[in-house]
Image (cartoon, coloured by chain):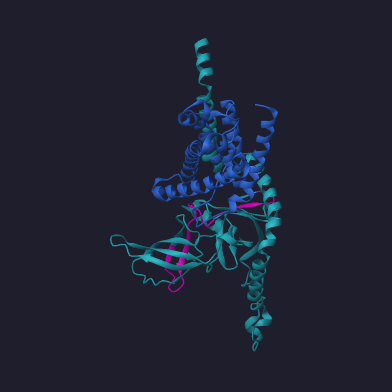
Chain colours: A cyan, B blue
Amino acid sequence: MRNLFFFLRNHYFYFLFLVLETFSLTLLFNYNEFQGSSLYSVSNSVSGYVNSMFNGISEYFSLRKTNRVLIDEMAKLHSRIPEAFYTTDVNIFYKKDSIVKLEYKYISAKVISNSTNKRNNFLMINKGAIHGIENHMGVIIGNKIVGQVVSVSPHFSWIMSMLNKDSRISGKFKKNNQLVNVEWNGGSYHIGQVKEIPKHVVIVNGDTIITSGNSDIFPEGLLIGTISDFTKVQDENFNNGEIFFSTDFNSLGYVEVVVDLMRKEKDDLKASFKTQQ
Amino acid sequence: MTSRTLFFNVIRFFFLVFLQVLILNNINLGGYINPYFYIYFILLLPFGAPRWLLLISAFILGLSIDIFTNTIGLNAAACVVMAFFRPFVISAISTGPESLIGDTPSLRNQGIKWFLYYSIILVLIHHSVLFYLEIFRFSEFTVTFIRVLLSSAFTMVLVLISEYLLYPRGK
């Protein structure tokens, strides 16, 4: 027993190293399970407040750009209000019909932390559960994609950026609606990968890829990017390409969270099909 | 350890954590390079610090960074490995008693050759563990290796600049 004690005392450095290392790795690999736990929400609110404090200062440096984006956005919205349409026949624009129902609602939020230089990038925004944000909601900027909500605290949300190894967005060619998958393999934050392009699709550099609306996260028709390069693989059924993202992930100021008002109905429909089987 | 060194190390801890979280984490050159300068704290811990203190302080340092980047455990694991290797690196590259003069490792006391060996080895250990743990797949081995090398170089530049600024020669 005394020998064991001496042994432990003489080699305490190694044991302490093993204990601390095991502890860190456990934290790291159970990270996803920790997201709902108290440790995660404490760290989330601490870093949230520090980040929003610092962001209050750094916001001033990008005011010019933010203004330009807002003016663009305003012009776009102006062109959609009823007064902007040429009204020869009032009936065409009569929308008080029970068939026309709002499917998507948008919550605007400010990005308070963002990264593009890691293999797995995340953003934090200053709106959370009390503003109506839930997991698996899509996040967009203008008509371009940003990412997906993966964790929510009362005042902040944590968003998995498109620039993440777990991000995979269902897209399609704008010209012929052929479905593809868009991923990001690291490296430059401008360039992503387009996987599983069917062989028969004729690809041209500059082809536009938009969201397919198949995934319940993003509405249909949001811009993902344009094809910048492609390779024809001989032995497989699909070709691969590179995509130049329309979103500038390094300068996100204000983003919008997409709330699908009919998501519950869609989920219920899927669930009822499963129970029937 | 005197109370003066303790005081300076605590101040340095907070300064480096906030520098890393608020400024350096936003730096991104070419999609590959971002510095992890906060490990300068571990490099500058006194020679006389007990070895358990090395590990514990490295762990707390890494965890503080993790809280702000929401990568709980990642930086902590890398820092603990780095602190573990520090005594071995010091004893491996120290040739005589003159290489341990002074309170803390520095360019001025130990000379450029000693300090370069010391910091490059430890920075490479830290960055390798950090980047490979973050990615955790071998299919991107070479890309990650390039990231490790470039980011280490950037971190080393910052370490050397602060060595020359804070501890000028011939004082």
Image height of A68 relative to B113, above or below: below
Which quadrant of the structure image shows residue A43? top right
* Left or right of A45, for residue A266: left
Does the magenta segment cover residue A169? yes
The residue at the far left in this view is A235
Instruction: Tell me if I can see residue A1 in this picture.
Output: no
**Looking at the picture, how far across and down is residue B141, in whole percent?**
40, 47
Which quadrant of the structure image shows residue B109? top right
Instruction: Name the residue nearer the viewer: A211 or A265.
Output: A211
The residue at the far bottom in this view is A88
Image height of B70 relative to B53, above or below: below
**Looking at the picture, how far across and down is residue B41, in whole percent?**
60, 38
On the rendered image, what quadrant is the N terminus of chain B found in?
top right
Instruction: Name the residue nearer the viewer: B74 or B26.
Output: B26
Does the magenta segment cover residue B42? no
Instruction: Tell me if I can see residue A20 in this picture.
Output: yes
Image height of A85 relative to A57, above or below: below
Instruction: Name the residue nearer the viewer: B70 or A13.
Output: A13
Image height of B68 relative to A218, above or below: above
- Name the residue: 69% across, 48% down: A50
Which quadrant of the structure image shows residue A136? bottom right
The residue at the far top in this view is A2
The residue at the far front in this view is B170
**Looking at the picture, how far across and down is residue A247, in whole percent?**
54, 64
**Residues shaded magenta:** A153-180
On the rendered image, what quadrant is the C terminus of chain B found in?
top right
